[in-house]
């Protein structure tokens, strides 16, 4: 795949950082704001697609991407099995405890639901939910990037990348 | 105040934007079928996805809107353009 | 093939079904009818003509407390109460990647074979 014109490459260099940061924000704030691992992972995979199309890069390390994908899925299952110790599979054993990810965000809602202000909770809340968000995000980033670069390099060069 | 009342307070402009998005989706979807140039059909499909994500946002589902915008308008378009590049551009 | 009249009748009946669905649909954001609500104070379900089901009220009442401590109720449902579904979704994506890479790898020779054939030129 040949690199595209100088205009496309410059704009890609400008947009690469902000879009990547936005995807990371969507993943890491999945337990506070709309979004989560899947959505943020799809955004970061879009950045990877932009890089592939603009620069025509052929030096993708597929082994590293496969490793990230497998690690994300295995860590998800492993965290689920850790919850088995204090309840059931995927039990949120960190919420309400004294560990790093803890916390009562806000008092329980009684009566008529009034609605919370957006992003009012601390970042280190949610128990296992942010961790699961991170693992799903890793898995989705690696999976969608792998699909895109495999199909893209196949379509343009008729052979695999390295 | 329920959610429906909140939305009906937005009134005329809300309904107009909602209607325009839906009409644009239908027109784009018809263009996808009508186009003989497969690249144009792919771009029309991307515009359907973009308008669908706008519709999800109007219907207060931001999670689905983000996923639809990233996957439908971004990755699916890229994969379909790769497929058009690997085969041929004109429909026969 | 199917005649044009049959196609038109089929499409018109489909359009009539969809329009009937739109006509029967409730207002946006307002579930109707009498249902059970969960009273967090009493700790039991009570009858009431309200807009949420018992499960919705349970999620809204408990997702911010010790149970999940998550501000975003959607995230709490997706990753905690229905975490097994999310695991299934991730597994589906994993299987899709495996299928794509297997399918596109089989169409062309492996790197090692190419190296043998071309005399070690590919790096």
Image: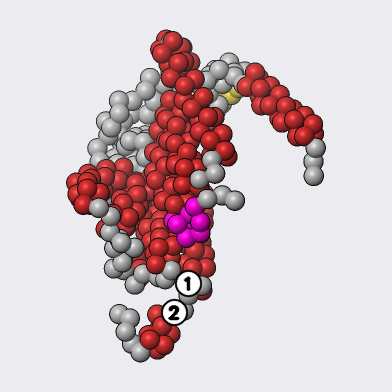
Q: Earlier in the sequence, mark 1 or mark 2?
A: 1
Q: Any mark on residue C110, and which?
A: 2
C43 or A7, nearer to the observer? A7
Q: Characterize the local packing of mark 1: few (<14), some (14-19) or many (20 or more) Cα atoms within 10 angstroms.
A: some
> Which is more toward the observer, B88 or A136?
B88
What distance separates the C-alpha of mark 1 from that of mark 2? 7 Å
Please indicate whether residue B33 sits to the left or right of residue B70 in the image: right
Q: Is residue C82 left or right of residue A61?
A: right
Q: Identify the chain of the residue marked 2, using the numbered disc in the image.
A: C
Foreground residue among B25 and C51: B25
Position of residue A68 relative to residue A127, above or below, is below
Vertical comparison of A88 with B47: above or below: below
Q: Is A68 on the left or on the right of A111, as rendered?
A: left
**What is the quadrant of the C terminus of chain A in the image?**
bottom left
Magenta span covers which residues?
A: B82-89
The answer to whether dots 1 and 2 both sit on one chain is: yes
Residue A91 showing in the rendered view: no
Q: Quadrant of residue C112?
A: bottom left
Could you say where residue A112 lies in the image, as x and y percent from the top left? 43, 18
Residue C8, relative to residue C26: is it above or below?
below
Q: Is residue C35 visible?
A: yes
Identify the element where label 1 is drawn. Answer: helix
CB atoms of marks 1 and 2 within 8 Å:
yes
Q: Is residue B84 magenta?
A: yes
At x 39%, y 25%, the residue is A109
Could you say where residue A144 lies in the image, as x and y percent from the top left? 41, 56
- The overriding secondary structure of the stretch rendered in magenta is helix
Residue A1: where, in percent of width, then height?
Answer: 34, 63
Q: Nearer the viewer, residue C116 or C16?
A: C116
**Number of marks in the image?**
2
Q: Is residue C75 magenta?
A: no
Name the residue that disc number 1 marks.
Answer: C105
């Amino acid at each position: 795949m040949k690199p595209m014109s100088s205009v496309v490459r410059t704009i890609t260099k400008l947009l690469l950082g902000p879009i990547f940061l936005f995807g990371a924000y969507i993943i890491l704030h999945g337990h506070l704001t709309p979004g989560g691992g899947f959505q943020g992972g799809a955004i970061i995979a879009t950045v990877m697609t932009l890089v592939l199309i603009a620069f025509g890069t052929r030096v993708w390390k597929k082994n590293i991407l496969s490793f990230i994908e497998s690690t994300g899925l295995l860590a998800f299952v492993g965290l689920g099995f850790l919850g088995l110790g204090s309840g059931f599979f995927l039990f949120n054993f960190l919420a309400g405890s004294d560990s790093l990810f803890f916390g009562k965000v806000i008092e329980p809602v009684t009566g008529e639901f009034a609605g919370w202000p957006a992003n009012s909770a601390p970042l280190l809340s949610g128990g296992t939910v942010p961790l699961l968000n991170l693992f799903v995000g890793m898995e989705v980033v690696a999976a969608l990037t792998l699909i895109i670069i495999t199909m893209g390099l196949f379509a343009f060069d008729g052979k695999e990348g390295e | 105040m329920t959610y429906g009342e909140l939305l009906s307070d937005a009134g005329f402009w809300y309904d107009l934007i909602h209607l325009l998005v839906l009409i644009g989706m239908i027109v784009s979807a018809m263009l996808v079928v009508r186009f003989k140039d497969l690249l144009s059909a792919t771009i029309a499909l991307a515009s359907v996805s973009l308008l669908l994500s706008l519709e999800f946002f109007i219907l207060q589902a931001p999670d689905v809107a983000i996923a639809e915008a990233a996957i439908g308008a971004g990755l699916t378009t890229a994969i379909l353009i790769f497929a058009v590049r690997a085969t041929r551009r004109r429909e026969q | 093939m199917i005649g044009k009249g049959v196609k038109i009748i089929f499409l018109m009946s489909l359009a009539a079904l969809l329009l009937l669905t739109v006509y029967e649909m409730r207002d946006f954001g307002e579930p109707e009818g009498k249902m059970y609500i969960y009273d967090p104070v009493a700790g039991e379900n009570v009858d009431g003509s309200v807009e949420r089901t018992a499960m919705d009220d349970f999620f809204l009442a408990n997702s911010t407390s010790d149970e999940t401590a998550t501000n975003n109720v959607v995230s709490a449902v997706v990753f905690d109460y229905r975490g097994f579904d999310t695991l299934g979704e991730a597994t589906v994506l994993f299987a899709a990647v495996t299928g794509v890479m297997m399918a596109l790898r089989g169409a062309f020779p492996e790197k090692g074979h190419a190296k043998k054939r071309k005399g070690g030129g590919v790096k």
